[in-house]
């Protein structure tokens, strides 16, 4: 989950309710989406950016910027794959 107030990304452990911070500096984190390659994309709606974490444990990097309020994200397979 992202915390839009702090710009932090947290991993939630549903079984026991605990959480751990995975990354910070994500602006006002809004949407999250995994792609089929295991990359995690995080949108910053107010900052106009999309970040990507390529693999677990890596730091987020800017994937796209200059966007107008990117919000909710989703990942779909290419039309030619099915």
Image (tube, grey):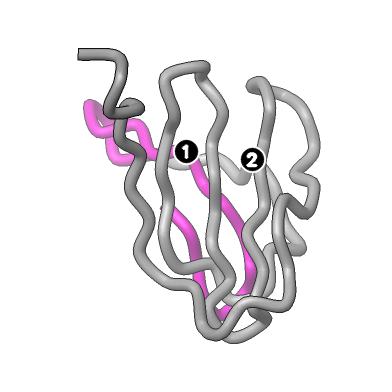
Residue plotted at (68% across, 63% down): 26
Residue 5 position in % (x across, y down): 55, 80
Viewport quadrant of the C terminus: top left
Q: Is residue 38 above or below residue 65?
A: above
Depth check, front residue: 5 or 67: 67
Residue plotted at (72% across, 77% down): 66
Q: In this view, does 51 lie above or below 12?
A: below
Instruction: Name the residue that disc number 2 marks.
Output: 22
Residue at the outermost front position: 80
Can you tell which quarter of the image residue 43 is in? bottom right
Tag 2 secondary structure: strand
Between the residue at mark 1 and the residue at mark 2, the CA separation in whole angstroms equals 6 Å
Instruction: Name the residue that disc number 1 marks.
Output: 11
Q: Is residue 17 above or below residue 3?
A: above
Q: Give the range drawn in magenta.
A: 1-18
Can you tell which quarter of the image residue 28 is in? bottom right
Residue 15 among magenta residues = yes
For label 1, the crowd category at 10 Å Cα-Cα, with few meaning under 14, some 14 to 19 and many 20 or more, is few
Residue 20 among magenta residues = no
Tag 1 secondary structure: strand
Residue plotted at (43% across, 33% down): 34
Is 76 on the left-hand or right-hand side of 45? left
Residue 27 position in % (x across, y down): 68, 73
Is 14 on the left-hand or right-hand side of 60? left
Sequence-wise first label, 1 or 2: 1
For label 2, the crowd category at 10 Å Cα-Cα, with few meaning under 14, some 14 to 19 and many 20 or more, is some
Q: Is residue 32 above or below residue 28?
A: above
């Amino acid at each position: 989950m992202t915390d839009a107030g702090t710009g932090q990304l947290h991993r939630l452990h549903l079984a026991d309710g605990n959480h751990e911070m995975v990354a910070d500096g994500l602006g006002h984190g809004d949407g999250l989406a995994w792609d089929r390659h295991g990359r995690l994309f995080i949108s910053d709606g107010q900052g106009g950016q999309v970040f990507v974490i390529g693999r677990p444990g890596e730091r987020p990097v800017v994937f796209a910027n200059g966007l107008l309020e990117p919000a909710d994200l989703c990942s779909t397979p290419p039309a030619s794959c099915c």
